[in-house]
Amino acid sequence: RSIQWRDAVCLGPMLVVGIVMGLTTAYLEKVHVGAQGVDWSLSFVERFLVAGRALWFYAGKLLWPVQLTFIYPRWQVSDVVWWQYLFPLAAVTVIVSLIAFRARLGRAPLVAVLFFVVTLFPALGFVDVYPFRYSFVADHFQYLGSLGIIVLGVGVVTDFVSRWAVGARTGIAILVLCVISTLTWHQAKVYTSLESLWRDTIAKDPSSWMAHNNLAGLRMDAGRLDEAIKYYERTAELKPDHPNAPNNIGQIHLLRDEIDKAERWLVRAVQVDSDFAPPHVNLGLVYSKQGRSELAEKHFREAIAIRAGYHLAHYQLGLYLMRAGRIDEAVRS
């Protein structure tokens, strides 16, 4: 039926609350979580291209849910690549067609598609969220939005098989449930541990620097340092502007007392991002071992300047000052 004023009165307050909470989330993502910088520096046109492609990606995964993975490859978006415009143009064409033919098709298809699009809107690229650093799409972004397409699909299939015999309809339903259950069981095995999760991600997307980095962290925590270095080196190769990997490689070499190798990797980490505090602390430790006191103190203090509450930097600076006989300064640090 048509939307009545009483619908607006009932739904209006929830819409207002939803908008306020959505804007709050967007603020927190940008200011506190860190969704800002080069990975989010997209023009409006590029965001439009991301949105159009994301809509078809999500619809495709609902229709054919294969190769599901925790992190999908991040698309290279360019407003000068003509074929990328086909995705948003096709999406707009579908909506316009459903509006034009709603008298023949009914309102249901249009409502279902609009529900899908509007519910997905916050995750389509127009609002910056931290996961966009790794990928523009994620299966969990469409959990709510998918209901529109699922209901539409169920309605179409129900209408198609309504004239079939009860036994045939029951058989089809059982078959669909068996297929979906099997796919769910198979996918659930991926999440039995962090190890299996990151291995599955790498198997489906060998270019996932996040998966290599996290798997390296698991190896490092387990004391399997040679394997950790291998995965961190792959991370540094895939994501040259990410300082965490060279910092961790340098830290491993520092633990092994391989000072020259540690220095090379830590200097690289600082060059990648001079405002990343951990490599400054590790460089301070390297220069302390080399007897280069002024450089050691400089990097400890640089780490504190970057992160005033960085306890490890304060602790290492305090130890350094204590060994240098500067007790009062050490106590203050």
Image: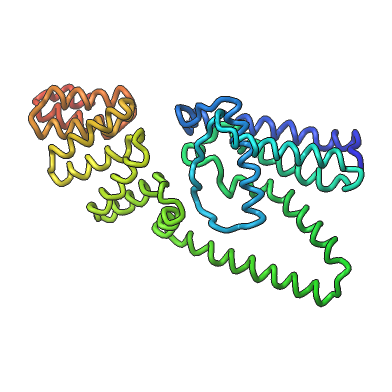
Quadrant where the C terminus is found in the figure: top left
Quadrant where the N terminus is found in the figure: top right
**Between 187 and 59, the one nearer to me in the picture:** 59
Residue 313 found in image quarter: top left
Instruction: Say left or right for 230 vs 130.
Output: left
Q: Residue at x 22, y 41 (%)?
A: 251
**Between 134 and 256, the one nearer to me in the picture:** 134
Measured as percent of width and height from the top left, residue 48 is found at: 62, 31
Q: Check the image and name the residue furthest to the bottom.
A: 167
Q: Residue at x 81, y 77 (%)?
A: 167
**Between 278 and 116, the one nearer to me in the picture:** 116
Residue 280 found in image quarter: top left
| Residue 306 visible to the viewer | yes
Measured as percent of width and height from the top left, residue 133 is found at: 47, 37
Measured as percent of width and height from the top left, residue 297 is found at: 17, 24
Measured as percent of width and height from the top left, residue 121 is found at: 66, 37
